[in-house]
Image (tube, helix red, strand yellow):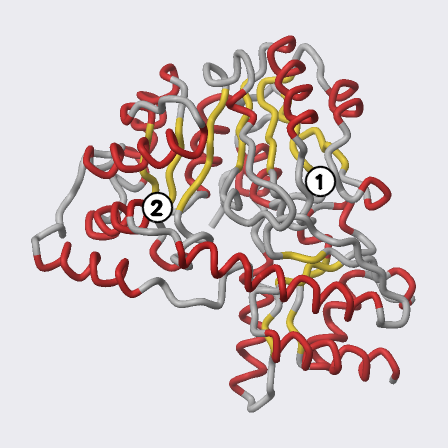
């Protein structure tokens, strides 16, 4: 069977491959501590689960309009209006099965051969994969350790060309945990306006700040008309398996992206959509408690990593990932990942899973219990000593 040539341009997300390897060892009786997959270890709040059950009992088991149930889009618009500080129209919201379709559809709708898309590297691997799949040219925007993995706005300016169609911004960042401060976002907005480029603002970690509060690039002049907000409920409400994301789109993209929804997945599951209303509009105490717990875990993992021989780690300002440098161990990123899994029973990800600039680093999710984090660090120390 001959695959279409475009399939050779499609990458993957190796976190799921690493999870499969770890599960295979567990099936053999090995004890594995999971620090690879990027999902909260908390349960979906009970009141959200109850809302989904009620929605099923009420008959929300059928097709919905491709952009989503209007009642749900209205709830998301109210939530975004409160968070962003400006009025978000329900008509600009499209509910998707997870956050990935927002980046997939945005890139497909905008980028084509001859276009360039600037994306963070190290960064979420699906950015580069989808840019290549669409036939456009990916342009890496380096995030460097010496800058605390912060986005270098001057470097962004040097990367922009007449072919730049889209700029991807991710703050807080996966995998580095870095945050773009408001002054940096303002300058990025100025560059996007000057270049007449669209911005895809991945804000899925907007609730996970440890030292500041979220600011969206859409709040700066000219950006609401040229930005797509990617968000969802997976991280903030521990709902990764529910596949419930959404995008806030400028008016010219709403109909095309809705058409892509129709042609691909038809719609997002009706009962999960209805549960989103409860998640977004009930008291947010659970979200705040989870982030506070992650802050404590961050300190445990960063201090522990910096105590390991040959490892150094910057302090992440957001999300729930550490991105330590492991070059001092004499191991490549891939070798370090394999050694920790096979010798220490600790599953983590090579930095190269997030782009070529991730070589020399690994990503560690601290979305695990404090006890497991301490045990993982002890296991890693013993493995490095052997």
Count of number-bearing discs: 2
User: Residue at (49%, 43%) from the top-left corner?
Assistant: 204
Q: Which residue is mark 2?
A: 97
Q: Give the quarter of the image for residue 245.
A: top left
User: Residue at (55%, 23%) from the top-left corner?
Assistant: 199
Please tell me whether mark 2 sits on a helix, a strand or a loop.
Answer: loop
196 and 12: which is toward the camera: 196
Q: Give the quarter of the image for residue 299.
A: bottom right
User: Residue at (79%, 44%) from the top-left corner?
Assistant: 148
Please report whichever mark, 1 or 2, sits nearer to the chain's N-terminal start. Answer: 2
Q: Identify whether 33 is placed above or below 101.
A: below
Q: Which residue is mark 1?
A: 121
Direction from residue 367 to residue 104 in the image, left or right = left
Q: Is there any visible trace of residue 114 in the rendered image? A: no
> Could you give the CA–CA distance between mark 1 and mark 2, rounded to whole angstroms?
25 Å
Query: Residue 138: where, in percent of width, then height?
Result: 66, 30
């Amino acid at each position: 069977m001959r695959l279409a040539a475009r399939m050779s341009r499609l990458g993957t997300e190796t976190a799921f491959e690493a999870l499969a390897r770890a599960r295979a060892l567990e099936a053999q009786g090995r004890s594995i501590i999971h620090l690879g997959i990027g999902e909260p270890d908390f349960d979906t709040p009970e009141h959200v689960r109850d809302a989904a059950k009620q929605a099923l009992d009420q008959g929300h088991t059928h097709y919905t309009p491709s952009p989503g149930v209007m009642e749900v889009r209205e709830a998301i618009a109210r939530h975004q209006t409160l968070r962003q500080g400006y009025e978000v129209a329900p008509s600009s919201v499209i509910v998707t099965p997870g956050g990935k379709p927002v980046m997939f559809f945005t890139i497909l709708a905008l980028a084509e051969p001859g276009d360039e898309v600037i994306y963070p590297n190290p960064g979420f691997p699906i950015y580069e994969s989808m840019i290549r799949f669409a036939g456009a040219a990916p342009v890496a925007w380096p995030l460097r350790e010496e800058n605390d993995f912060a986005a270098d706005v001057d470097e962004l300016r040097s990367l922009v060309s007449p072919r730049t169609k889209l700029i991807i911004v991710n703050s807080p960042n996966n995998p580095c945990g870095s945050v773009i401060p408001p002054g940096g976002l303002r300058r990025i907005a100025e560059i996007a306006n000057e270049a007449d480029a669209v911005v895809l603002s991945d804000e899925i970690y907007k609730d996970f700040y440890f030292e500041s509060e979220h600011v969206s690039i859409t709040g700066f002049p000219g950006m609401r008309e040229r930005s797509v907000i990617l968000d969802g409920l997976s991280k903030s409400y521990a709902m990764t398996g529910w596949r419930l994301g959404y995008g806030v789109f400028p008016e010219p993209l709403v109909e095309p992206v809705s058409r892509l929804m129709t042609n691909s997945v038809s719609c997002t599951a009706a009962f999960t959509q209805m549960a989103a209303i409860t998640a977004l509009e009930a008291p947010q105490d659970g979200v705040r408690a989870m982030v506070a717990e992650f802050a404590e875990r961050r300190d445990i993992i960063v201090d522990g990593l910096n105590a390991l021989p040959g490892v150094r780690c910057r302090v992440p300002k957001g999300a729930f990932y550490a991105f330590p440098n492991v070059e001092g161990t004499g191991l490549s990123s891939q070798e370090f990942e394999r050694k920790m899994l096979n010798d220490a029973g600790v599953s983590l990800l090579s930095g190269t899973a997030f782009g070529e600039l991730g070589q020399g680093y690994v990503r560690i999710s601290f979305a695990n219990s404090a006890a497991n984090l301490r045990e993982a660090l002890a296991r890693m120390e013993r493995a490095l000593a052997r």
